[in-house]
Image: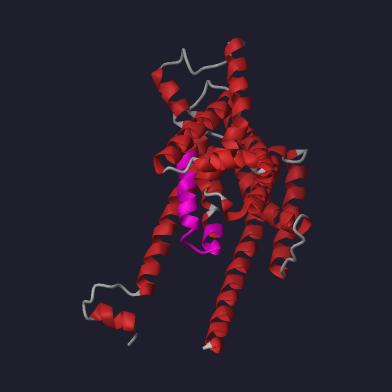
């Protein structure tokens, strides 16, 4: 009997490390599930923001996210890094690039949701893991395993099929997939030097001048809806800051506690829910031929997921073997 197990069985009060680790993983999985559940509900949430145009929703999303992030940083006494951010040219440039890509992603997503193209947006997030793998090869020079190559090739076949079925490339889906994959690549470059809340604060800080100008233009041209459409509509626009920040913080809490493979599997919750919302709640029609294209994408994702699980298991076995040899 191990020392930790003996202490627990004797009522020593100190739980076994394995039990504490399992509890942390369970809590992290719950955080991740909730984060992806909230992201999956975005189509219904953003559709409720009409008659606000997509650009106004984007501006409020950035502005109120920034306000909330700053309040959180002030509350925890972590505002010093904002001054340092403007002194670190490389980090500032990376945050500007990250802000540009996530702003593109948010704008296209809002346009898709508010113009009845939720299913195309969902396809973009199904394609995102495949695009991320492809960028890893092209930009970072990573080498793919056979399973990853198979997934990418099936994904390319799906892209060609859907382009033929649509009559043109699915630009909404591709833009969402590539912009988010590029955003993830830049975040990888930034590394762990910033927490999730600090990173979002930096990204919204660099976007703030543009969205303030955008709100001023919308007001001058009579296109803003923040006033004149009731208190409920104003509160919904104010809530975009919380809707943006809360799932991000839940995701960050999950990422610290669960294996990357688990995060990779949980991420499919969001596009599945978005697809269901588009078809079942928002009344979008998905032809049978389009389901075939989605099916090809799902086959690619299954291949990619199985490959990730097998690879992670192999890595754990090698790590245990190395640890055993070192004893």
Residue at image point 49% right, 52% down:
252
Percent across and percent down for residue 80 are: 51, 41
Q: Is residue 260 magenta?
A: yes
Residue 279 percent coordinates (x, y): 54, 39
Name the image colouring.
secondary structure
Q: Nearer the viewer, residue 269 or 192?
A: 192
Side (left or right) of 49 relative to 172:
left
Residue 318 x, y percent position in the rendering: 59, 80
Point out the stretch of residues depicted in magenta: 245-264
Q: Is 23 colored magenta in this rendering? A: no
Residue 281 shows in this picture: no
The residue lying toward the viewer, choosing from 140 and 147, is: 140
Q: Position of residue 280 (x, y in %)?
A: 50, 39
- The image shows residue 238, relative to residue 103, as above or below, that is above
Dominant SS in magenta: helix
161 vs 43, left or right, is right
Residue at image location 57% in from the left, 79% down from the top: 319
Quadrant of residue 7 in the image?
bottom left
Position of residue 35 in the picture relative to residue 319 (left or right): left
């Amino acid at each position: 009997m191990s020392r930790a197990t003996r202490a627990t069985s004797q009522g020593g009060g100190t739980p076994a490390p394995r039990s504490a680790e399992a509890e942390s993983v369970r809590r992290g999985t719950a955080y991740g599930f909730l984060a992806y559940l909230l992201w999956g509900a975005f189509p219904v949430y953003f559709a409720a923001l009409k008659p606000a145009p997509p650009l106004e929703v984007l501006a409020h999303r950035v502005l109120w996210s920034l306000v909330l992030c700053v309040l959180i940083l002030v509350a925890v006494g972590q505002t010093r890094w904002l001054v340092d951010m403007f002194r670190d040219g490389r980090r500032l440039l990376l945050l500007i690039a990250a802000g540009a890509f996530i702003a593109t992603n948010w704008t296209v997503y809002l346009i898709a949701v508010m113009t009845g193209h939720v299913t195309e947006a969902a396809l973009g997030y199904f394609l995102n893991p495949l695009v991320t793998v492809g960028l890893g090869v092209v930009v970072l020079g990573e080498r793919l395993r056979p399973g990853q190559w198979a997934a990418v090739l099936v994904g390319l076949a799906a892209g060609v099929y859907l382009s033929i079925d649509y009559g043109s490339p699915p630009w909404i889906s591709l833009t969402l997939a590539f912009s988010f994959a590029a955003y993830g690549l830049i975040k990888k470059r930034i590394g762990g030097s910033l927490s999730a809340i600090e990173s979002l604060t930096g990204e919204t800080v660099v976007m703030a001048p543009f969205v303030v100008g955008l709100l001023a233009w919308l007001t001058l041209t009579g296109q803003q809806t923040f006033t004149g459409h009731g208190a409920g509509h104003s509160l919904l626009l104010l809530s975009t800051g919380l809707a943006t920040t809360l799932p991000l913080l839940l995701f960050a809490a999950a990422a610290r506690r669960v294996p990357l493979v688990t995060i990779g599997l949980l991420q499919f919750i969001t596009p599945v829910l978005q697809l269901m919302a588009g078809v079942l709640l928002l009344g979008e029609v998905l032809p049978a031929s389009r389901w075939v294209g989605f099916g090809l994408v799902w086959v690619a994702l299954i291949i990619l997921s199985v490959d990730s699980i097998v690879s992670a298991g192999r890595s754990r076995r090698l790590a245990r073997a190395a640890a055993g040899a070192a004893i």
